[in-house]
Image: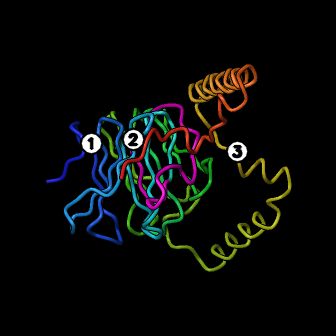
Amino acid sequence: SFEWGADTVTAVRFNPAQHSLLCCLSADRGVTLYDVSSGSALQKMTMQTRANACCWNPMEPMHLTLASEDHDLYTFDMRRLSQAICVHSGHVSAVLDLDYSPTGTQFVSASYDKTLRLWNVGEQSCYNVYHTKRMQRLSCVQWSMDAAYLLSGSDDTNVRLWRAVANERGAPQLGREQRKREYAAALVEKHQHLPEVRRIKAHTHLPKRVLKAALVKKTVRGTQQKREKNRRAHSAPGAVPKVQRKKKQVWSVQE
């Protein structure tokens, strides 16, 4: 048995490449790395808010993504837990689960705000949002092994099956249909720098309640930044250092 702290363990995930390495989440806001082969703990990171779920990138197994209670997701490099590589923002309520695609280029998150969001690795904002009128708060999500489908479980006692690419047809396509889709995708890629194409590509339809919550969250965050800026302006030089958002969430790292 392994222990570092004395609080409830909420999640455990083994590393896909180094099978003796596991990540453990606990209710005391701790994220601990254990080495089963040596029978000891390697590092423990304490965050500002509790992490609800974790997942390793299958193609870059040194990278770990955490779903946090503060509505954001954080990607860390296990070799340097003192700051996050990327902060993924967009949800307006606690993120409860996430999973990587088998290709390791995207991941999906399930939130208490009744939405699924799809993210590209290394990007701060999501590229697609899935939601329905009847779907309630999401508790779990899984990516299929062929990277074509997503499965989600919610409080309305339903398991839903989604396409990983929303406009992709399930039936086999004819050759000319496949070529037409590839040509359309190439056109979008070629002209993505144009403002009209960029706006249409970035647009995602969201429920009104999510838009309202996002506006409130933006206002609160702007107020906090303004208050911190004023405190820094009226303090002695260096008394209130400017901390990057990637470092703010990490409380301490023990080795």
Is 184 situated above or below 228?
A: below
- Residue 217 picture quarter: top right
Residue at 41% across / 55% down in the picture?
99
**Viewer-closest of 214 and 174:** 214
Q: Which residues are magenta?
A: 76-100
Is 216 situated above or below 189?
A: above
Tally the marks: 3
Q: What's under tag 1, amino acid-wise?
A: Thr
Residue 14 in the image, given as x and y percentages of width and height? 29, 61
Residue 140 in the image, given as x and y percentages of width and height? 35, 45
Position of 109 with respect to 9 (left or right) is right
Residue 122 in the image, given as x and y percentages of width and height? 59, 57
Q: What's under tag 2, amino acid-wise?
A: Thr
Residue at 62% across / 80% down in the picture?
175
What residue is shown with label 1? Answer: 10
Q: Secondary structure at mark 2?
A: strand
What residue is shown with label 2? Answer: 46
Task: Please name which of the two marks, 1 or 3, marks the residue nearer to the observer.
Answer: 1
What residue is shown with label 3? Answer: 203
**Viewer-closest of 110 and 245:** 245
**Viewer-closest of 154 and 132:** 154
Q: Earlier in the sequence, mark 1 or mark 3?
A: 1
